[in-house]
Amino acid sequence: MKFNKNNIKILLCIIAVITFVSPLTTKAALRGYKAGDIMPEFSVFNINDVNYTYEHDNGNPVLLMFISQEQQGSQRAVTDLNQVISRLGKNAQNLKVTIVVEDSNDSFEESEEFEMIKKFNVIIDPEYKLWGKFGLIATPTIVISDANDRIVWVKAGHNYDFIPNVRTHINKALGISPEDVQDDVEVKTVVNDTIPARVTRHLQMASILSEKGQVESAIAEVSKARELDPNSIKVKLSLAELLCKAKRNQEALDVIVNIKPTNEIERGNVLVLKGWVNQQMGELDAAQSYLLEAISIDKTSIRAFFELGNVYKAQGLIEEAMKAYYNAAAIVLKESKSVQEIPKNQ
């Protein structure tokens, strides 16, 4: 799980408990760039092992997009960006597009998202060197500069207005109008009304509604997806998570117990949900056990560490709670080297 609106809420809760985390937030913010700043120069190797150098006075607008290989928001951003670029027509050749991926593996390089981005300049940045240069802590993030090397737009996150905003600022960087773009390429709309496509649309709408705090409406959208595909583990996980957020604990538990994981990632997600719902129901020993097992599978699970902190706090184990909250904050802020040791389950 990466830095999105839900994680911001978690981070704010953590900061309220452990105020010493706030200097990390300030430090990260001070390194960031904003519209009007000069784009920093950089030199990195791309996936083809070719050194790519961005220098000032190159005469071309530049678009950088920082993504995470497993984050749904990044996946949607890749799809949307590909759509925007394809509609630029001949104007696309004047825009230098670089996609920065935090890490990569075989499954990602075989994915549909990778097929979409490999036509661009792709940088794999597992040590966050380029991220550090720009002071970024969120995915996806887009940075667009004009032909004069001045940043015209910086945007973190993905939401319903992603496409029109990206298109508008690309046009600004290129110095073209929306009408020029429409003239360059014939736009065809294809309505995909298959069941998987409809399920995906319901899940996407649920994600948008959840980020806006409209959890009950989000639950209704995922419930529609479940009616279309009652056996989908992804849909069940999404529904259980939203029910946990709404503190509809028994309903969440009813969904969770019917999920049959097919791999370790799904099993870890189920364990987090079991820990979360048991913590909210006051079953602290069970919650602790589930969450520690989830962390043993995925040591980057923000929700697992956060709920574990809540468990320890409820048990009066303040030092253990502080460590768990700190770990959640460290993951959000990508300060992975600062993660503290969590006591093993007794």
Image (spheres, grey):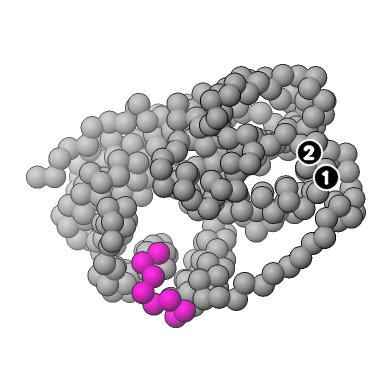
Q: Which residue is mark 2?
A: 93
- Badge 2: how crowded within 10 Å, few (<14), some, or many (20+)? few
Look at the image and say whether residue 70 sits in the magenta stretch: no
Seen in the image, is 261 located left or right of residue 129? Answer: left
User: Does 187 appear above or below 157?
Assistant: below
What's under tag 2, amino acid-wise?
A: Gln
Q: Residue at the spot x=76%, y=19% of the render?
A: 56
Task: Give the Cα distance between marks 2 and 1.
Answer: 6 Å
What's under tag 1, amino acid-wise?
A: Lys
Q: Residue at the spot x=46%, y=48% of the render?
A: 110
Residue 154 in picture, x, y percent from top left: 68, 37
Residue 42, located in which quarter of the rendered image?
A: top right
The span picked out in magenta is 227-234
Q: Which residue is mark 1?
A: 90
Seen in the image, is 91 located left or right of residue 215? Answer: right
Look at the image and say whether residue 231 sits in the magenta stretch: yes
Residue 45, located in which quarter of the rendered image?
A: top right
Q: Quadrant of the C terminus?
A: top left
User: Does 343 appear above or below 185?
Assistant: above
> Do the CB atoms of the residues marked 2 and 1 lie less than 8 Å apart?
yes
